[in-house]
Image: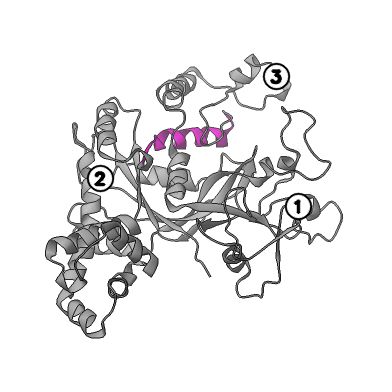
Amino acid sequence: MPRDPLIALVGKPSSGKSSTLNSLTDTTAKVGNFPFTTIDPNRAVGYLHIPCACSRTTLPGNTPSSPSEPPPLQSRCKPNYGACQQGTRSVPIELLDVAGLVPGAHQGKGLGNKFLDDLRSADALIHVVDVSGTTDSEGKATRGYDPSVDIAWLRDEIVRWVLGNLMQKWGGVKRRHTAIKATAVETLQGQFSGYGANSQVIARTLDKLALKQALQDWDDATIQKVVEAFVDEKFPTVIALNKIDHPDADKNISKIAKQQPPERLVLCSAISEVFLRRLVKQGFVLYIPGSEFVDTREDLLENGTSPEEVELKEMDEKLKTRIENLKDMVLFRFGSTGVNQVLSRASEVLGLVPVFPVRNIGSFGSGDAGTAGGDRAVVFRDCVLVKKGSTVGDVYRKVMGDAPLAFTETVGGVRVSEDELVGVGKNDVSV
């Protein structure tokens, strides 16, 4: 069965990695009360925000009477895991907190060996970078540090680690490759399987390089190119430029933007997200994670809400000023705190597709309620994440294991083959 994706968070000390992780795993600002979940000391469940199927599907005779009305199924969407708020669903996804990132990790510095070993099972990385330049390479306070250096040496550490392991046994690898007349993909899969790579990853790596030489004829420069391409393919990295509200951040963002692909960069302020979620929990504001809007008691009253309907607490002037500053420096300027977008971008890099398996394609419900009005009225209880290119059969096996598949139906009761691909809006609601 396909395993669930795993996204690793890395970052030097004081980069804001812990604040970012806490924001991604916190659900206090969402509908429902779903606690932070720790799987083991460095694994946790984060929440990826996606458009829910309840916002785009309807039942016969149950359509909105006007465009301004929310889709009728939104009020009946009650996920088993995560939450759904105004058509935005929080889907659990496993995160790995990787500690020990310092220069020289491949030589065992810091928690070097453990840091690199922890990365083996990751499908993608989120590199949290202190873009303010107020911490040096070891996380110590400074001023004027160039954060683009951190981005370069993370990749360099991983490349050196993989390259060092490969070169230690390259002579034997070449001899065996020649003796058994293996393909380059077969030989490299034997060497890179320990990093969680399959033959498809190896094949894509070699296809991008289009090498002319046979493997036994590769020189050191070619081997390094192969390793670099493999690292980029196996460990796609989203760069979270954190602390964007610092005065020194702008110049560093501009420099990094010229060096890195724009689709891999996300601007964020993790401490702002943590602050807003704390205020939600304390009852001072209304805030949906990922939004640019924060409503206080005064905002609601100004918009015409009656005092009796406003349940938010009064704030003192100091707290009001902090919120106004956060709005001006982060939310209005950048559109959000960026924290939720970090995980969304990692999902895009991996090509993850949300799929909504149901038991009753006619009602989108679980279909197992014992009494009327129970779970029969609830829709889209489950959502699973699969990789782009997955088929209906792949989704079935992920959900049901080895149980035999008789048939699968999608919206409208249309039967589909298990070889049909799934995508957003295509075979992604099925029974």
Using the image as rendered, state which of residue 40 and residue 361 is in the foreground: 361
Q: Position of residue 160 (x, y in %)?
A: 19, 60
Q: Are marks 3 and 1 in contact (CB under 8 Å)?
A: no
Q: Residue type at mark 1: give it.
A: Gly
Is 281 within the magenta? yes
Q: Which badge, 3 or 2, is on the more N-terminal residue?
A: 2
**Residue at point 51%, 35% (across, down):** 290
Q: Residue type at mark 2: give it.
A: Ile
Work out whether 105 lies above or below 76. Answer: below
**Residue at point 67%, 41% (across, down):** 56
- Location of mark 3 (residue): 307
Q: CA distance from mark 3 to mark 1?
A: 46 Å
Q: Position of residue 365 (x, y in %)?
A: 75, 54
Using the image as rendered, state which of residue 410 and residue 286 is in the foreground: 410
Q: CA distance from mark 1 to mark 2?
A: 48 Å
Q: Is residue 40 left or right of residue 411?
A: left
Residue 20 occupies which quadrant of the picture? top left
Q: Main secondary structure of the magenta part?
A: helix
Q: Is residue 153 left or right of residue 273?
A: left
- Location of mark 1 (residue): 412
- Location of mark 2 (residue): 151
The furthest residue to the bottom: 179
Using the image as rendered, state which of residue 142 and residue 181 is in the foreground: 181
